[in-house]
Image (cartoon, rainbow, N blue to C red):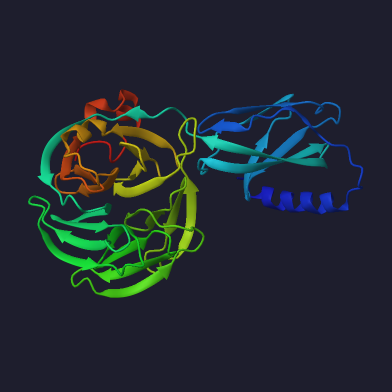
Amino acid sequence: MKNGLPVLFSIILLNFACQKKHQPKVIFKHFPEKWHLNQTVKIYGHNLKEFNIDRVLFKVDQNIRGGTKPFDTLRIPPLPGITTGKHRITFYFFSRKKFIDSLTRPFTLFASKPPFELKYQLIAEYPHEINAFTQGLEFDGDTLYESTGLNGESSLRKTDFKTGKIIKKYNLPKQYFGEGITIWNDSIIWLTWQSKKGFVFNKKTFEQIGSFPYGKSKEGWGLTHNDRVIFKSDGTEKIRILDPETLREIDSFSVYSYKHPIKRINELEWINGKLFTNIWQKNALAVINPENGEVEAVVNLKPLLKKLKKHPGMDVLNGIAFHHKSGHIFVTGKKWDKLFEIEIDSNSIPKKQHANHPPQGLQNN
């Protein structure tokens, strides 16, 4: 954005405040409310010529973006630095360098294209505690940490993933329903479901050393982190971003596919630049680009269900852990008797993705 535009927008707002009440209004013949990432959007004007409109500026949300030539069809180029989800765009119309009118419209930004399917190979199966109502799963080296849910059954566990043996366990007070975890330095951060409260535990001793409120989100579902921030899901299409030191929410973004918002985002795992998540009650993983909220790929895990022991308490897929040394992904579910180790097949990534920008986290290490 050129340096002069912020000053120009200040002048626009001043002029707008001084206008007469019966100022002529610019209207659109057609305004598309569904946009897609990387798409040039066409907006059909109706009376631009009538007012001799010769310049149009626009801003999206609170961020000034740019301008477009004042033809009968306004063309909005792909917007940099914007995420999928709901937005508002405001147009400012000029005639002979004089501000004429402004017009604001809502729109929803969807993914640029449908997600591709990632294939995988099943590497190994390991025993998993059949009564563990799995909510969070994360590796620290070769040690697997797991959190479980349900009131009166919620626990934090340190396990040997190869044998399923529980090395250390802490039971959460029964008034809390445990949810996802993530490990930050020497601490384990653990969510609860509807108590609007999370806990911090010492990774070595399992001693509680802190707690934190949720802020804007009403529930806690899943957690993961990269080297800068913590990502939190709350059962909606929103991914909340937390400061790892204060655990306060500092930002958020929405997750959309090509056609729909992706609600009920649950367990999260950060894998080399991408967010892997399972959607509650879906037997698949979604791969999210955290830069723009786009669902880029899916991993169909339904075939794994055939390998499980069926029993009355068995519930849905939940639990994703990335083993950094092997580059493999480990998945399980609520009261599943097995933990599965899978390897993503790099041949299932579209060639264009390989050539232009290999999607981190979708290739084998």
> As drawn, is 342 to the left or to the right of 77?
left
Q: Is residue 141 visible?
A: no
How far from the left and from the top, in percent, is residue 223?
34, 55
Q: How many marks?
A: 0
Q: Is residue 23 visible?
A: yes
In the figure, is residue 230 to the left or right of 342? right
Residue 204 sits in quarter? bottom left
Residue located farthest toward the left when viewing the structure as drawn: 163
Residue 29: percent from left, percent from top = 75, 26
Which of the two residues, 165 or 183, is positioned nearer the viewer here?
Answer: 165
Image quadrant holding the C terminus, namely top left
- Residue at (77%, 42%) from the top-left corner? 102
Q: Position of residue 152 (x, y in %)?
A: 29, 64
In terms of depth relative to the viewer, which is nearer, 352 or 275?
275
Residue 11 image position (x, y, % from top left): 78, 52
- The relative height of residue 345 versus residue 163 in the rendered view (above or below) is above
Residue in view at x 32 percent, y 61 percent: 151
Left or right, residue 64 beside residue 52: left
Q: Is 243 placed above or below 2 here? A: below
Classify the position of the N terminus by image quarter. Answer: top right
In this view of the protein, which residue sits in the foreground, 99 or 143? 143
What's the residue at 48%, 48% (across, down)?
Answer: 253
